[in-house]
Image (tube, helix red, strand yellow):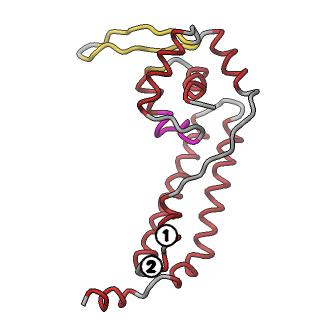
Amino acid sequence: MNVRSICLAILYDGDATGYEIRKLSVEGEYSYFVDASYGAIYPALARLEQEEFVTSRVEQQDGKPAKKIYSITKTGRATFIQSLFEKLGEDEYRSEFLLFLRFASELPQSLVEQRLNERLAQIDSDLADFDRMKREHNHPGDAWVIDFGRTCMQAARHYIEAHGAELIALARPDRDDAAAAE
């Protein structure tokens, strides 16, 4: 899958501006699927329009610049569904949090504990977002995908709660920081 596919997926559900597509694919619900940078979305939309997989129209707005709204064509719908038949790539997982935790033994215990608590709070926020998404979406596959994501996040939360103390114990006692600074 690529940026073109994520643009088509978003438009499959309904018309959208480039800004809305960018927002959904970078920080919204579609950000969980494919890495789509800001700089890649608009060129992808331009190519999709050239290939007649999408069309666009310009709508004037009172007191604001005109906006360009994209729609998927019948050919675009077929192309998107056909792309789902292609072999899937491996899932990618990158985490600054895990890099931080890898070096927990070099850090003060209070900082490690703080980062674990921050992650728990972020997970709780993400779980609330999943609940909101589940209420707002009605595509047949949405509930399954959202429940899968919730299950992964709940497992991460459970692991942190069950094993966080082990990681904190690996970290340096806070008093070592004060002694090292002298």
Residue at mark 2: 106
Q: How would you classify the magenta stretch by its main secondary structure?
A: helix
**Picture quarter with the N terminus:** top right
Which residue: 49% across, 73% down? 103
Image depth: mark 1 or mark 2 in front: 2
Which residue: 42% across, 72% down? 114
Name the mark on residue 133. Answer: none
> What kind of residue is marked 2?
Glu
Above or below, 90 relative to 117? above
Which residue: 45% across, 65% down? 118
**Dot 1 lies on which element?**
helix
Return the disc, 1 or 2, that comes first in the chain's sequence: 2
- Across the whole image, how many numbered discs are drawn on residues? 2
**Picture quarter with the C terminus:** bottom left
Q: Is residue 153 magenta?
A: no
Above or below, 48 relative to 121? above
Residue at mark 1: 116
Find residue 117 and report its horizontal and vertical position in percent. Answer: 47, 69
Task: Categorize mark 1 by other alpha carbons within 10 Å: few (<14), some (14-19), many (20+).
Answer: many
Which portion, as a residue range, is magenta?
A: 24-32
Find residue 107 and report its horizontal and vertical position in percent. Answer: 42, 78
Above or below, 55 relative to 19? above
Q: CA distance from mark 1 to mark 2?
A: 15 Å
Q: Nearer the viewer, residue 101 or 124?
A: 101
Find residue 43 and report its horizontal and vertical position in percent. Answer: 45, 21
**Quadrant of residue 174 within the rendered picture:** bottom left
Q: Nearer the viewer, residue 73 or 170?
A: 170
**Quadrant of residue 30 within the rendered picture:** top right
Which residue: 66% across, 16% down? 77
Left or right side of 113 for 93 = right
**Dot 2 lies on which element?**
helix
> What kind of residue is marked 1?
Leu
